[in-house]
Amino acid sequence: MNFNKPLIHGTLIKRYKRFLADVKLDSGEIITAHCTNSGTMRSCLEDNAEVYLTPVDDPKRKTKFTWEMIKINGDWVGINTGNPNKLAFDAVKNGEIEKLKGYTEVKREVKFEDSRFDVMAQNEHEACFIEVKNVTLKEGNYARFPDAVTTRGKKHLETLIRVKEQGMRAVMLYIIQRMDVDTFAPAKEIDPEYAKTLKKAHEKGVEIIPVLAEVTPGKIELVKEIPFEL
């Protein structure tokens, strides 16, 4: 995924009210950027760290920048939660994820029962519902999800189980927007119910696919699938 516009460089002053971040641009100007990530952002939040922002032209937006990434320990971490959905859609459509190749029709935001899944792919043989989650939390060499309790995420897992029970393919796709990890696992200490439901979903046939994404100021690129532990 290439960024449509050149990103704007600055340093983080602080993040507050979940959806706002004050940033000092290289020009010296201090601006407020929109933060799409509603989680705690543990392990990817550091005052005075380098950041990159996307300028926004929408006159209806109060904030004129969207926060895209932050540099932590020398590596860029992508924190825009909207980007994984775009990455996943393009990757499935173009056959870039080995386990999700072979689909002739790929759609975004498809409803199933009372849930809406990020991607639905199908061919003449099967339909596949895919839920996409953005992962930024790092503990040791592990990428973990979630970084805050998510009842919505638990609901998606329960609906994926029902997708599988109705004879369709159900996939939980974790897009990990950092390269300094090598294994995925649920954050049991943060949200034990989510971790328990993920294990149940896997036992019921829901597939788990964690994929590393390399984040740079020019683009975000899916690199490889990594193993997971439940």
Image (tube, rainbow, N blue to C red):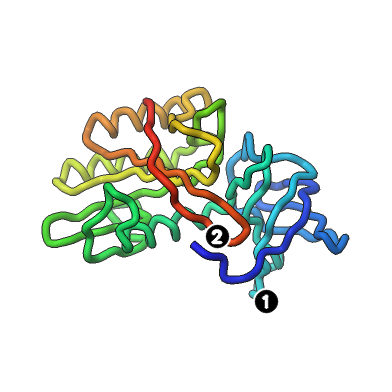
Check disc 1 and give the amino acid type: Pro
**SS assignment at label 1:** loop
Check disc 2 and give the amino acid type: Lys
Quarter that holds the C terminus: top left
Q: Residues within 10 Å of mark 1 (few under 14, many from 20)?
A: few
Query: What is the CA distance from the residue labelled 1 to the residue labelled 2?
Result: 26 Å
Q: Quadrant of residue 126?
A: bottom left
Q: Quadrant of residue 186?
A: top left
Looking at the image, residue 110 lies above or below residue 205 = below
Q: Residue at x 41, y 28 (%)?
A: 195
Which residue is situated farthest in the top direction here?
189
Looking at the image, residue 194 lies above or below residue 88 = above
**SS assignment at label 2:** loop
Q: Quadrant of residue 107?
A: bottom left
Q: Is residue 212 left or right of residue 124?
A: right
Task: Read off the residue under disc 2.
Answer: 219
Q: Residues within 10 Å of mark 2 (few under 14, many from 20)?
A: few
Q: Nearer the viewer, residue 170 or 8?
A: 8
* Front disc: 1 or 2: 2
Task: Read off the residue under disc 1.
Answer: 59
Residue 227 spot, x, y in % from top left: 37, 33
Which residue is situated farthest in the right direction here?
28
Q: Nearer the viewer, residue 84 or 109?
A: 84
